Every structure is written in structure tokens, then in C-alpha cells.
Image: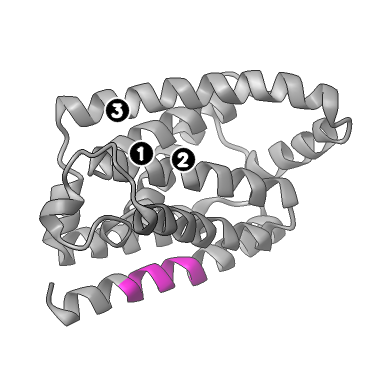
Amino acid sequence: MRPKTRTMRVVLLGAAIVVWIACFRLLVRHGTWLPFVVAGSLLAALSILSDPSVRTLLRPTLARAGIGIAGAVVMIGSTYGGFFVLRLLVPSLEAQTRSLYALLHAGDVSDIERAGLIVIVASAEEVLFRGVLIGRESTEQAQRFSLNLDGSGLARIALFGGLYAAPAAASGSPLLVVVALICGLYWGWLRRLSGSIFAPILAHAAWDLSILVLRPLL
């Protein structure tokens, strides 16, 4: 890997973290997802256009689609089942969840428009936060399907999960930070498992659409 390429990847990741913090503050103050859509699209486009490895990792295959769909089914089922149990054990969870939905449903938009925004933002987040850097050292290895995770692999998943969740603190919702961390770890694992960004994009978008549009938890 050329030093300039790696530097560009690190710079884009750092920019995404800073921009996401700013976008969450704008969401809280002005109730709009537009900054996420615009900034996320621009940063993701820059990553895709400037890095051939990202374009390769986005390439769809039947195997990657299967992993993404299966990952979405597991995640969606676990969320509904887990919430049913946790709301009985943690009385405050329901109020926190309602507050989070009020924040995430910001803006007077239709469900179709909301679904479109979700797909755009979810795709951008996967490109920016689960890109080449979370994979193995070489591009060839990073694109290879693997069930094996060594200490380095687990450390990268944990690191990028934390980097993904950290900006959510700017929303003022502790629940969102916890959800973002759990989701970031899971999507990072799918990224490593599939050797692609395509699989976690499918899982991420499907989960968001299910929880936020099709069948909200509350």
C-alpha cells in the first residue's frame, strides 16, 4: 500500500468522525438529517473515487448478498426479541426509546422519503466507518471471506466500533451511543466475515428500515 493511500484513508475516517459530531449537533438543534445526507454522500463519494480498493469491496456477489441478508435477519430478530425482554427488566428503557425515536424521526418527511434518507446515510456510514482500514493488511486479504478472527481482527472491530459510536455522544442520548456501539461491532464483524462493504450495507439498511420505518419498537 502506498503511504499516500493509507494517509488518505485515515484522513477521510477522521473527517467522517468530526463531520458526524457536527451533524448530530445540527440534528439536535434543527431537527434535520440533511447534513448527514449531504456530507456523508460527499465523503463516501470521495472515498470511492479516490480508492480502487473501496470500489472492489463494494462489488456485489451472491455470497456477499447472502451474508448481508442473513446478518440482517439475525439482527432484526434479535432487536425485537431483545427489546421485548429488556423493557421488562429495565423500566426506564421505554421512555429512553421514545425519546430516541423523537430525535431520529426529526423532520416532516414521508415514510418513503425517510426510507431513502436511511439508505443513503447507512451506505455512507459503511463506506466511511467500515472501509478498507478495518480489513486485513493487504487488499487481497481484506476482500477474502473468512470465519477466522485473530486478536488483531477483534481489536480492529472493537476500535472501529468505538470510533463509529463516539460521535453519537453529541446527540445527548446515552441509548443511541450504546446502540451505535453494538451495531458498529456487529457490522464490523460482518465486514470482516464477508471481506466486503456490500454485506454490512445490506444488513445496516435493512435493520434501519425495519426499526425506523416498517415496524418501530414503540
Magenta span of residues: 10-18
Q: Which residue is mark 1?
A: 190
Q: Which residue is mark 2?
A: 186
Q: Nearer the viewer, residue 169 or 40?
A: 169
Give the distance between the C-alpha atoms of the residues marked 1 and 2, in whole angstroms.
6 Å
Task: Give the mark nearest the N terminus, 3 or 1.
Answer: 3
Q: Which residue is mark 3?
A: 67
User: Furthest residue to the right?
Assistant: 91
- Judged from the image, the secondary structure of the residue bearing numbered disc 3 is helix
Give the distance between the C-alpha atoms of the residues marked 3 and 1, in whole angstroms.
8 Å
- Judged from the image, the secondary structure of the residue bearing numbered disc 2 is helix
Asked whether disc 3 touches disc 1, contact meaning CB atoms under 8 Å apart, the reply is yes
Callout 1 crowding tier (Cα within 10 Å): few <14, some 14–19, many ≥20? many
Any magenta on residue 117? no
Q: Quadrant of residue 147?
A: top left
What numbered label is drawn on residue 23? Answer: none
Callout 3 crowding tier (Cα within 10 Å): few <14, some 14–19, many ≥20? many
Asked whether disc 2 touches disc 3, contact meaning CB atoms under 8 Å apart, the reply is no
Residue type, numbered disc 1: Leu
